[in-house]
Image (cartoon, rainbow, N blue to C red):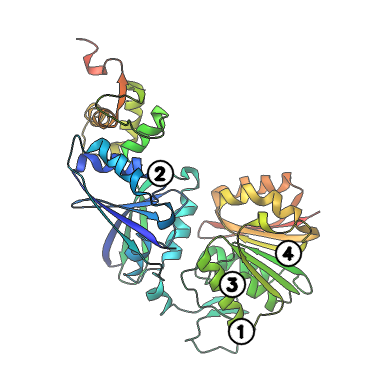
Amino acid sequence: MNYVEVSLETTPDYVDILTAELAEIGYESFVENEDGLLAYVPEADFDESTLQAILAKYQIFTAIACSWQTLEKRNWNEEWEQSYEPIEVGDQIRVRASFHEPDARFRHDLLITPKMSFGTGHHETTWLVMNEQLTLPHSGIDVMDVGCGTGILAILARKLGAQSLLAFDIDEWAVENTRENFALNELHEQAEVFEGTIEEVPAHRQFGGILANINRNILLRDIPLYVQHLRAGGWLVVSGFYEADQSAIVQCAEQNGLLQKRSSTRHQWATVVFEKR
Amino acid sequence: MAKEITGYVKLQVKGGQANPSPPIGPALGSKGLNIMEFCKQFNGRTQDKMGMVLPVVITYYKDKSFDFVIKTPPAAILLMEASKVKKGSAQPNRTKVGSVSWDQVRQIAETKMPDLNCFTVDSAMKMIAGTARSMGITVAGKAPWEENN
């Protein structure tokens, strides 16, 4: 997705006000600089007339010079990705890039080229979920990966014996990247990937395992939907939230008929494993 | 031994909505920092402030690690929330689109105190009230320091 960078040269007194006004019309983030403000909005949401109407309100009181440019979609995380270190989860899983040599001591060798998507195992939540996957039954079941990022959790699910995979993400980079990583790890026929949300998964699709490393608010909203797609006796692993939010997640899951099996934490991040009764 | 600081990045990002697009992407990516790690952490820590603009100061280190501090939202954002207006007045000098009480101004001033160059709550309140007026938001009633006059 391309972004528009709007540059506003103005006096310091009006920087906060313009930030608040632009935030209301969909501008996502801001940088204050010596001249005023840089504001960023997805190109699809940029509307010149709305912007000019806001500026006109304040140009009565202060000078505001405005210009903008389109920033092309690109992989801003490339520099980090080109030199990332392999990650080990216990003594069975090793996540590496193509430029790392394989290590035969590890049973599960995952090749991940991230391309501005989340999920290399460096973050605590990815590590925690993979660690839980090692002790969950995968053999012969269908697994859904919600908010798949690089596809790392789905790839591990397949390596642990999952019969088929359904992975999706709202981010176009993640969808493209999951497909690339599935190919890198030679997952083809049994893996479906799409751009979207849980609401686009057909109602009849049932899974023996669901992986959801997202965030607290999305989980609280969507756990009831995950439950609808989970077979009786199936497992759900959730992560992407801090320990402080764990009780809210557990309460929501239990209210929707799930049974907490166990939980684990790492540097204040939490993961919980549930089972459908 | 303390890690060697290489520099700082200051941004304003909506709570729960950090993503690797500009400005986060180029600001962190050009320094070799893991953007996705920052987004996950920032979003995890701001789930209670979804959509609210939050200033964040990122400290990055020689070993490419980083940490960050989330500051209080801009006063104008807090004023919009308090006055329940979704945007400022079309003509801030003539048309007032919302109002806040001095108690609300005090609350905002107290929230903002850690990030303002003010020594007293009264001086912070004056600053907040000035921002309100510039946005077309009325501050109803007498200021506390005028009440005895």
Q: Nearer the viewer, residue A80 or B86?
A: B86
Q: Which residue is mark 4?
A: A209
- Residue at disc 3, secondary structure: helix
- Residue at disc 1, secondary structure: loop
Q: Nearer the viewer, residue A139 or A198?
A: A198
Q: Amino acid at mark 3?
A: Ile
Disc 4 to disc 1: CB gap under 8 Å: no
Disc 4 to disc 3: CB gap under 8 Å: no
Q: Earlier in the sequence, mark 2 or mark 3?
A: 2
The residue positioned 57% from the left and 77% from the top of the image is: A181
Q: Earlier in the sequence, mark 1 or mark 3?
A: 1
Q: Is residue B37 above or below residue B145?
A: below
Q: Which residue is mark 2?
A: A25
The residue positioned 22% from the left and 10% from the top of the image is: B148
Query: Quick check: do tags 4 and 2 share a chain?
Result: yes
Pick out the residue farthest to the top.
B149
Q: Which residue is mark 1?
A: A106
